[in-house]
Image: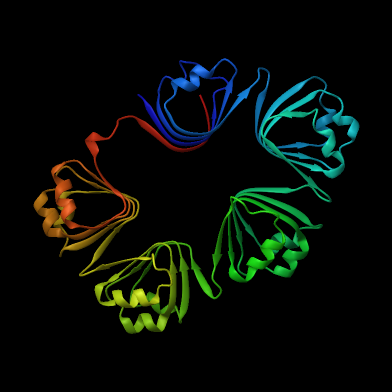
């Protein structure tokens, strides 16, 4: 069976053969491709949409992914030539003796960044002679590496003995109660590859600790807003916990039909949303008044609504069980079973908003859907026309 693959961070072809790539039908996007000299035909044989960069790796070099620490113990343990391609960071310890760098046994190719004490930076050229890397000098302590989702908290700052040079690859979040004076004292330098999420009152402290934020996305949460990290569904009772709150969210907010204008006015002052708000048509105008972003999508309904967030299969029987014509909001994937009739769709679905995907097993239903679609930023596909084969969507490293 042919295999389709979505996004691949690193495609490793160092040990690939014509046989090992035979089952790959297509790869959409690849950040970097590693291949051996003389194996360019393997790269040509693969159907790849977009490639960020390629790297030809000489024979004898093995791959090291992540962070490589060059300390005294590691360098003294090398008794014969070592050839490494480092896809990540190299950190040279401040206690490394210059003589250990002159042994001539370590040979590196680096695709990433090299952090070195200032007094050793000039001695690295014989060791790191190839690759696409950037050299960064540090003064006191070597950088502390964090990856994935990392939250900067007061406990983290308290645990630091000396000033820290913090490098985060992924998403860095500042806790709301972070002591910014302590942050200023304990963090000597901050480097982020990815995204930073912080509050408005913390923003000035951030820029004091960063030399450059090029290529880094910064999310600033307005002062006085409460952050919602999940989809929120509010009814006449649950909304009462808010007392004139300002709400900040990237997730949907859903209002049941029993939520009145008076209750909303008492509970919510402002809404800053980059997602959708679903509400009864009688309070739609009020929602527009409360939202601070012009591009916030407000979806109203007349009687009731059903939100599809994951993947759901709906049959004819399920639609018939609805008491009244209903609004459908597809934020995930809705699969219409093969027994779903055109008449049932017309009678039971009042309007449909397609933010995700709808899959139909009868192409005649596509025409019916077009007549009841209100918002369509997603897609409608015929299931039988989809390409067959296993699929992988997001892969960090793929070795073929």
174 is higher (above) or lower (below) than 384: below
Residue drawn at x 30%, y 80% as measured from the top left:
260
Colour pattern = rainbow
303 is higher (above) or lower (below) than 151: below
Q: Quadrant of residue 186?
A: bottom right
Spot occupied by residue 382 in the image (x, y as percentages of width and height): 22, 40
Spot occupied by residue 355 in the image (x, y as percentages of width and height): 32, 54
**31 or 283, which lies in front?**
31
Q: Quadrant of residue 33?
A: top right
Total marks placed: 0
Describe residue 203's horizontal placement relative to residue 27 as left or right. right
Residue drawn at x 78%, y 64% as measured from the top left:
185
Q: Quadrant of residue 133?
A: top right
Spot occupied by residue 50 in the image (x, y as percentages of width and height): 46, 34
Residue drawn at x 87%, y 42% as measured from the top left:
119
Describe residue 252's horizontal placement relative to residue 379 as left or right. right
Spot occupied by residue 353 in the image (x, y as percentages of width and height): 26, 58
40 is higher (above) or lower (below) than 234: above
Q: Residue furthest left?
A: 343
Residue drawn at x 61%, y 65% as measured from the top left:
175
Which quadrant of the rendered structure holds the N terminus? Answer: top left
């Amino acid at each position: 069976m042919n295999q389709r693959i979505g996004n691949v961070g690193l495609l490793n072809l160092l040990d690939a053969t014509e046989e090992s790539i035979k089952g790959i039908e297509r790869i959409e996007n690849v950040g970097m491709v590693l291949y051996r000299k003389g194996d360019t035909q393997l790269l040509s044989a693969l159907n790849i949409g977009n490639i960020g960069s390629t790297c030809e790796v000489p024979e004898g070099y093995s791959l090291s992914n992540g962070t490589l620490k060059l300390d005294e113990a590691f360098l003294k343990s090398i008794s014969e030539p070592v050839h490494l391609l480092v896809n990540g960071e190299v950190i040279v310890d401040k206690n490394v003796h210059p003589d250990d760098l002159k042994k001539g046994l370590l040979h590196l190719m680096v695709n990433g960044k090299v952090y070195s004490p200032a007094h050793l930076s000039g001695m690295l050229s014989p060791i790191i002679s190839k690759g696409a890397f950037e050299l960064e000098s540090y003064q006191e302590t070597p950088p502390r590496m964090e990856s994935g989702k990392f939250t900067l908290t007061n406990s983290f700052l308290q645990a630091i003995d000396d000033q820290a040079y913090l490098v985060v690859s992924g998403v860095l979040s500042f806790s709301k109660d972070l002591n910014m004076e302590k942050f200023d004292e304990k963090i000597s330098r901050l480097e982020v590859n990815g995204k930073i999420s912080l509050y408005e009152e913390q923003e000035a402290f951030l820029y004091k600790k960063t030399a450059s934020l090029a290529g880094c996305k910064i999310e600033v949460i307005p002062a006085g807003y409460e952050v919602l990290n999940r989809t929120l569904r509010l009814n006449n009772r649950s909304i009462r916990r808010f007392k004139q709150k300002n709400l900040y969210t990237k997730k949907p907010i859903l209002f049941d039909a029993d939520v009145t204008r008076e209750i909303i006015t008492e509970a919510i002052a402002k809404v800053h949303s980059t997602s959708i708000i679903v509400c009864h048509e009688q309070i739609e105008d009020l929602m527009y008044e409360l939202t601070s972003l012009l591009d916030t999508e407000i979806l109203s309904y007349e009687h009731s609504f059903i939100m599809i967030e994951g993947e759901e299969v709906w049959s004819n029987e399920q639609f018939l069980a609805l008491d009244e014509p209903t609004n459908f909001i597809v934020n995930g994937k809705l699969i219409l079973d093969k027994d779903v009739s055109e008449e049932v769709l017309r009678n039971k679905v009042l309007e449909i908003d397609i933010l995700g995907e709808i899959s139909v097993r009868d192409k005649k239903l596509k025409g019916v859907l077009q007549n009841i679609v209100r918002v369509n930023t997603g897609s409608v596909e015929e299931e039988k026309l989809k390409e067959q084969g296993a699929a992988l969507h997001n892969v960090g490293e793929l070795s073929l």
